[in-house]
Image (cartoon, rainbow, N blue to C red):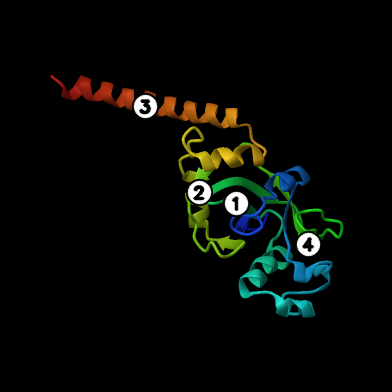
């Protein structure tokens, strides 16, 4: 296994458009697309020699689509963001694939990589910046920060509640795990207080 690269990706049409996360989880892929590249199979091109229509994309679009088409590799790790939340995690299972019959959004989201989704991942609230990019490569430090982040509380975080079902997770399961985490923290805190009482309180 080569050293994986880490990616942060949005699976939504713009900042407030329709999300395709649920569809991607069901089909076990991540996807991206732009109308100006519709019906163009990027496996026939390279980053050094893209299709002629490439010039019509904005710089941020070129950067994001290029990551999916030419830079993501097997065993890379992907984090999916929704607003300020990281709501899903997956492992790339193979190279870019062109889906000429995609029905996502306007049918232009034809550019995919296969992904094995981590069904145990619990959403966390972490901002990783560079929000103008649909796809952004992360350093290991940022990736580790997400992995160590405290799970967001779906009982008070309405945005997380909105994406919990959409991300293919049971909100009840997330809430149960959150309560378990708080219970463990309470037990630890109680143990610390007991030690303090035993040795320092007269």
Q: CA distance from mark 1 to mark 2?
A: 9 Å
- Left or right of 142 in this view: 118: right
> In terms of secondary structure, where does tag 4 sit?
loop
Identified at 61% across, 70% down, the residue is 60
The residue mark sitting in front, 3 or 4, is 4
Q: Quadrant of residue 192?
A: top left
Label 4: how many Cα within 10 Å (few below 14, some 14–19, many 20+): many
| Residue 59 image offset from top left, x and y in percent | 62, 75
Labelled pair 4, 2 in contact (Cβ < 8 Å): no
> In terms of secondary structure, where does tag 3 sit?
helix
Q: CA distance from mark 1 to mark 4?
A: 22 Å
Q: Which residue is mark 2?
A: 146
- Left or right of 59 in this view: 31: right
Q: Which residue is mark 3?
A: 188
Q: Which residue is mark 4?
A: 108
Query: In front: 106, or 57?
Result: 106
Identified at 52% across, 60% down, the residue is 139
- Residue 79 circle label: 1
Labelled pair 1, 4 in contact (Cβ < 8 Å): no
């Amino acid at each position: 296994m080569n050293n994986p690269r880490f990616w942060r990706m949005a699976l939504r049409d713009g900042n407030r458009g329709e999300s395709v996360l649920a569809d991607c989880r069901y089909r076990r892929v991540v996807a991206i697309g732009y109308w100006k590249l519709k019906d163009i199979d990027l496996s026939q091109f390279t980053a050094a020699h893209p299709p002629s229509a490439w010039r019509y994309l904005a710089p941020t679009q070129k950067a994001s689509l290029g990551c999916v088409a030419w830079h993501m590799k097997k065993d890379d790790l992907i984090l999916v963001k929704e607003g300020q939340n990281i709501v899903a995690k997956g492992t790339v299972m193979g190279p870019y694939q062109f889906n000429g019959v995609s029905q996502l959004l306007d049918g232009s989201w034809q550019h995919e990589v296969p992904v094995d989704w981590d069904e145990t991942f619990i959403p966390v609230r972490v901002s990783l910046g560079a929000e103008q990019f649909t796809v952004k490569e992360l350093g290991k430090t940022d990736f580790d920060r997400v992995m160590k982040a405290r799970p967001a509380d779906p009982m008070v975080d309405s945005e997380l509640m909105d994406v919990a079902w959409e991300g293919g997770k049971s909100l009840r399961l997330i809430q149960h795990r959150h309560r378990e985490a708080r219970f463990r923290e309470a037990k630890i805190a109680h143990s610390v207080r007991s030690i303090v009482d035993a040795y320092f309180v007269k």
